[in-house]
């Protein structure tokens, strides 16, 4: 798909949709008490700060001409007090909103991570992991500030503008009208800039997402890069992506930097107009020096909330696109989920039955058609056949990683579509060819199969699958720290650890999908003894291209042409001299 590329921009251009904003209220409602408290503190801080020009006016018009030194000291102390109150309340408000913002980040990220854990495999196949990460990290950081400080700031700046206007008209009506006359010029400048500014910052987000996706891809594929000496080519691609990001950033900053000079110039012209009309046009009797000082002070402050509101609106527009991507991820359908009224399956014996099962990954392109078979508890079933025939699909359907397109699958007579996923999968052990190792100790990786397992149980599981010896020979034994994806372990060692992890979970149904492919022949012979113990009393499905490993299975199914073409024991199929016979003898050559 086109979106599964690091060099394809995400479509972040979208109209300002208040629907996304309303939906985000659920994250704000939880902290509405703290947000209201912060708003009240902000209002008191703003009102306290607005008393300054009035105090100055009174001092210049009354106290200074009357030479009342004591009163001047009192007014000076009062002015200092208003400043301190404003600073203290603003600081407390900032601390409250910092906590609220971080709590919102935690809530949104928790919801995103929980949802990502349930999404189907196809979701991760369709997009670069770096572009998923940027949604969980960068986008959440951006919108959390908008949802916390942004909402309060819009209310506060709106009130600030009203308060300042009221205070201005209390001082002088005519000069206040001069200040308001600058609004049309300001609006013209803002509307001229904002459209370009919004698109520029959205382009920055796209380029950042692309850069993040390519960086993550190259970190994971570092070994392949060095094997094929692709360092110079990859560096050139990274340089190109990084340069695009730099150019988009500079372009966006260029538009943003047009805002404050324009606002500052308009504010300066308005203050000049106040001096011009106040000192030259109007009579000294109607406009005092204190009035002019107070009005210039309010005029300077009047444009700040307007500019802040303009920036906040622009920020809302940009972050609505981020909210859209966050909600898009949260809305990604969990196609495999517990159905309404699903019940726990209870302890599994292991009888598995496919009844006329049809399945397609893509609509209209069937991988399996009308497949039926029954497996008794404790039987071992080998699935063989050409690549892409549907072997892994069959075992994936048993684990309900996908839902059947037609027919049904039952375990112990229970339709697996009607039981809870947790009760089903917790009794299944699945070993894949690519054995994933988490960062942490070896013991932690094995205990992943059963978190309450004791150290003794971990060692016993490792001994059965022939992993105990090489683990003990490591520097810290079972407490040896392994890095992400087990980078310091061989492929065979990772698979043996995964075997121990699966055995520890004590599954009733066992699936081995090419699970011994990375193990050498000597280790495989030793492991076979452990596998025989592992398979006892368990229904098992084994996929293996190395046919010598599945000769002793109770039944072998040859999968091809969207179904089962042959089924029987090794000896029966060899006597038949059909598809299995040809496949087996070809490996002996």
Image (cartoon, rainbow, N blue to C red):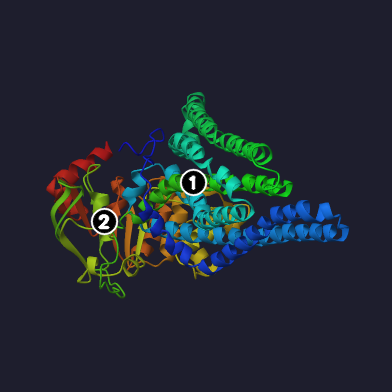
The answer to whether residue 376 is seen in the rendering is: no
Residue identified by numbered label 2: 402
Q: Quadrant of the C terminus?
A: top left
In the displayed structure image, the side of residue 187 where residue 478 appears, left or right: right
- Relative to the observer, which residue lies in front, 207 or 417? 207
In-image side of 282 versus 20 (left or right)? right
Does the rendering let one see residue 290? yes
- Quadrant position of residue 505: bottom left
Instruction: Classify 243 as above or below 23.
Output: above
Q: Which quarter of the figure has residue 416? A: bottom left
Task: Give me the residue at 45% from left, 54% from top.
Answer: 496
For the residue pair 270 and 557, the one nearer the viewer reads as: 270
Q: Position of residue 162 (x, y in %)?
A: 54, 55
Q: Residue at x 63, y 63 (%)?
A: 44
Q: CA distance from mark 2 to mark 1?
A: 41 Å
Q: Secondary structure at mark 2?
A: loop
Checking the image for residue 439, the label placed there is none
Q: Is residue 250 left or right of residue 24?
A: right
What residue is shown with label 1?
Answer: 315
Q: Quadrant of the N terminus?
A: top left
Tally the marks: 2
Q: Position of residue 508 (x, y in %)?
A: 33, 68
């Amino acid at each position: 798909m086109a979106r599964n590329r690091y060099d394809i921009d995400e479509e972040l251009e979208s109209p300002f949709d208040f629907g996304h904003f309303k939906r985000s209220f659920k994250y704000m409602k939880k902290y509405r008490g703290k947000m209201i408290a912060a708003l009240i503190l902000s209002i008191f801080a703003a009102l306290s700060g607005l008393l300054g020009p009035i105090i100055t006016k009174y001092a210049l018009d009354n106290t200074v001409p009357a030479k009342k030194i004591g009163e001047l000291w009192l007014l000076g102390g009062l002015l200092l007090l208003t400043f301190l109150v404003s600073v203290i309340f603003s600081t407390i408000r900032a601390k409250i909103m910092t906590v609220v913002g971080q709590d919102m980040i935690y809530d949104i990220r928790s919801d995103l991570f929980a949802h990502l854990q349930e999404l189907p495999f196809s979701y991760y196949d369709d997009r670069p992991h770096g572009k998923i990460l940027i949604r969980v990290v960068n986008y959440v950081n951006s919108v959390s500030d908008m949802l916390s400080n942004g909402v309060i700031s819009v209310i506060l700046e709106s009130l600030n503008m009203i308060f300042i206007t009221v205070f201005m008209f209390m001082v002088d009506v005519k000069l206040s009208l001069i200040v308001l006359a600058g609004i049309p010029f300001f609006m013209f400048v803002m509307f001229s800039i904002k459209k370009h500014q919004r698109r520029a910052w959205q382009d920055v987000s796209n380029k950042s997402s692309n850069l993040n996706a390519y960086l993550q891809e190259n970190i994971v594929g570092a070994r392949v890069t060095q094997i094929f000496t692709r360092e110079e080519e990859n560096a050139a691609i990274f340089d190109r992506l990084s340069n695009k990001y730099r150019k988009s950033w500079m372009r966006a900053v260029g538009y943003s930097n047009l805002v404050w000079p324009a606002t500052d110039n308009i504010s300066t012209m308005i203050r000049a107009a106040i001096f011009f009309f106040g000192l030259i046009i109007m009579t000294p009797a109607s406009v005092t020096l204190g009035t002019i000082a107070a009005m210039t002070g309010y005029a300077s402050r009047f444009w700040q909330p307007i500019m802040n509101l303009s920036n906040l609106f622009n920020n809302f527009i940009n972050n609505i696109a981020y909210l859209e991507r966050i909600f898009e991820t949260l809305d990604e359908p969990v196609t495999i989920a517990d159905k309404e009224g699903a019940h726990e399956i209870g302890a599994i014996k292991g009888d598995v039955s496919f009844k006329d099962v049809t399945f397609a990954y893509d609509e209209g392109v069937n991988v399996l058609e009308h497949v039926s078979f029954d497996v008794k508890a404790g039987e071992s079933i080998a699935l063989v056949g050409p690549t892409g025939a549907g072997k892994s699909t069959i075992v994936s359907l048993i684990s309900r990683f996908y839902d059947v397109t037609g027919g049904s699958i039952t375990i112990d007579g229970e339709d697996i579509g009607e039981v809870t996923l947790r009760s089903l999968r917790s009794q299944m052990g699945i070993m894949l060819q690519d054995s994933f190792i988490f960062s942490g100790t070896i013991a932690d990786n094995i205990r992943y199969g059963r978190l309450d397992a004791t150290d003794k149980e971990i060692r016993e599981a490792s001994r059965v699958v022939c992993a105990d010896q090489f683990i003990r020979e490591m520097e810290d034994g079972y407490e040896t720290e392994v890095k992400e994806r087990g980078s310091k372990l061989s492929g065979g060692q990772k698979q043996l650890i995964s075997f121990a992890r699966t055995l520890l979970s004590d599954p009733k149904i066992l699936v081995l999908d090419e699970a011994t492919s990375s193990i050498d022949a000597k280790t495989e012979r030793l492991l076979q003894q452990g596998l025989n113990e592992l398979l006892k009393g368990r229904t098992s499905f084994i996929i293996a291209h190395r046919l010598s490993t599945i000769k002793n299975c109770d039944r072998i199914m040859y999968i091809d042409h969207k179904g089962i073409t042959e089924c029987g024991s090794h000896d029966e199929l060899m006597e038949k001299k059909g598809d299995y016979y040809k496949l087996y003898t070809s490996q002996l050559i």
